[in-house]
Image (tube, rainbow, N blue to C red):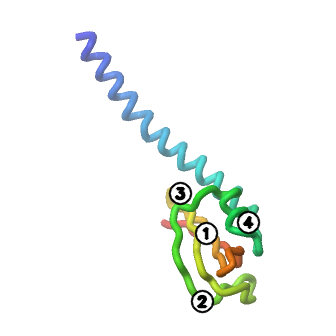
Amino acid sequence: MARAYKIVVVVILVIILAPSVMIGACVVRARQYSRGHEQVEIGQTKRSVVDALGEPSEVQVCSGHVYTDGKVTGECAEKYYYHSFLESWGVLFDREGNVIGKFYHVSG
């Protein structure tokens, strides 16, 4: 009987702790992405973006003009996405690998 009790206690702890750890990881990742995204500026290189934000969650090829503050800042060649729960941060690069724009989205 004592063994069954221990198993039940362990299962209950796992059920309670697993979601807490997963939510905590999302919060930490979102803070890292938010802080890093604030550091990204037009003209920076891909290397400096990866240094600030880490490796992207997703990379996409893109095309077309990018507008920042109503002005064309360049021709988009690649997008880096950084995803966390219901949030995405993105950085746009030109053909030379320099930042030409950035964005933030909240899903809901």
Give the quadrant of the N terminus.
top left
**Where is mark 3, residue-wise?**
84
State the separation of the CA atoms marked 2 and 4: 21 Å
Nearest to N terminus: mark 3 or mark 4: 4
The amino acid on which the numbered mark 4 sits, given as a three-letter code, is Val
Nearest to N terminus: mark 2 or mark 3: 2
Q: Secondary structure at mark 2?
A: loop
Going 26% across and 13% down the picture, which residue do you hit?
3
For mark 4, does the 10 Å Cα neighbourhood hold few (<14), some (14 to 19), or many (20 or more) residues? Answer: many
Nearest to N terminus: mark 4 or mark 1: 4
Image coordinates of residue 34 in percent, x first then y, are 66, 58
State the separation of the CA atoms marked 1 and 3: 12 Å
Which residue is most to the top? 2
The amino acid on which the numbered mark 1 sits, given as a three-letter code, is Gly
**Where is mark 1, residue-wise?**
90
**Where is mark 2, residue-wise?**
64
Instruction: Kindly report which numbered mark, 1 or 3, lies closer to the viewer in this rendering.
Output: 1
Going 56% across and 67% down the picture, which residue do you hit?
81
Going 33% across and 28% down the picture, which residue do you hit?
11
